[in-house]
Image (tube, rainbow, N blue to C red):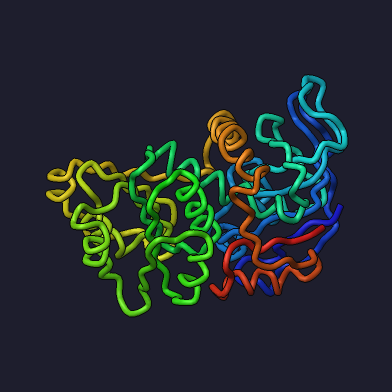
Amino acid sequence: MKAVYIAEFGSEDNLKIQEVDEPCEIGASDVLVRVRAAGLNRADLLQVRGLYPPPAGYSPNIPGLEFAGEVAAVGDNVSEWQIGDRVFGITAGEAQAEYLTIDSSLLVRIPENLSFTEAAAVPEALITAHDAIFTRGSLKQGETLLIHAVGSGVGLAGLQLGKANGSMVIGTSRTADKLDRCAEYGLDHGISTADGIAFAKQIGEVTGGKGVDVILDLVGGAYFPQNLASLSVKGRLILVGLTAGRTAEFDMGMALQKRLTITGTVLRGRTTAEKAEATQKFADEVVPLLASGKIRPNLDRVFAAEDLISAYKYLGSNESFGKVVLEF
């Protein structure tokens, strides 16, 4: 089968399409998926650069965390899926290939109104955002949500979920154009961080001094002190990304005074059971919103698998608004 292959770690220029062995065995609870499209993520960029290897059992040379395709074969104990079913989901690696073996509990049926390409833009962003905002952050109706890097794939997913929940959503971005485009998705207030990250003052003005209830932080680094200042009493900070660094000053007195909750989360390293729980909540609570059109895939650009270097470079340019997808 054909697969995206990292010939040498370090640069996107070392990527190529290569023939590799097809999965030779299907476990009793596994499903073989013929992948039709796969989403790209910043974790893939890090893997290409040799900075984010996959968990044991997955090839470090074949990236890919999300996919959409059709069932090609099922294990002996699998009864819920049939050959030909249209499915999508998340995996810890190897999604950017023509075939993928995955535990049946990590699959979700694609709504009829979505194509394979649209569906491939969904799982990683929406499962991550839903798990972070609602399972970890316990966002309730009427509460306020702040999203950093709101124009990213996960950021746009969180924005749509927040608005579907009836929340006021505030977003930050280094790119003013992305904030303007996010208004189409219902963003209530956009804050530019192009000239600095002193956003706490603006948060106070927007919320009447109360602060926000939940922050979805996809940036990390120096945003941390401003996050603490921006949170309301009993506010919840959910750390998902570290694109701006992994260290920051921590005013513990402010955390104590406000009785804050700070949670870090990542999907890739979780056990199959933990991923299955997040996937099931996505299937129950988010897929119906996709099927009804209340939320939609955040699809930016689509590339043929053979044009993978251009796709990776486009993602790395920070010009994308939403998801970049490869078609197989």
Numbered label tally: 0
| Quarter where residue 198 is shown | bottom left
**Considering only vertical position in the picture, is 316 above or below 298?**
below
Q: Residue at x 25, y 57 (%)?
A: 207
| Quarter where residue 7 is shown | bottom right
Is 307 in front, or is 195? 195
**Considering only vertical position in the picture, is 74 above or below 71?**
above
Q: Picture coordinates of residue 87 (x, y %)?
A: 75, 40
Q: Residue at x 23, y 43 (%)?
A: 260
| Quarter where residue 229 is shown | bottom left
Q: Farthest residue toward the bottom?
A: 195
Tell whether 118 sits left or right of 183.
right
**Considering only vertical position in the picture, is 298 above or below 256?**
below
Q: Residue at x 57, y 53 (%)?
A: 53
Is 263 in front, or is 202? 202
Tell whether 250 sits left or right of 164.
left
Tell whether 251 sits left or right of 312.
left
Q: Residue at x 52, y 37 (%)?
A: 270
Q: Picture coordinates of residue 290 (x, y %)?
A: 64, 45
Is 224 in front, or is 10? 224
Q: Picture coordinates of residue 316 (x, y %)?
A: 57, 71
Tell whether 113 sits left or right of 256.
right
Q: Picture coordinates of residue 122 (x, y %)?
A: 64, 50
Placement of the C terminus among the 4 image quadrants: bottom right
Is 325 in front, or is 244? 325
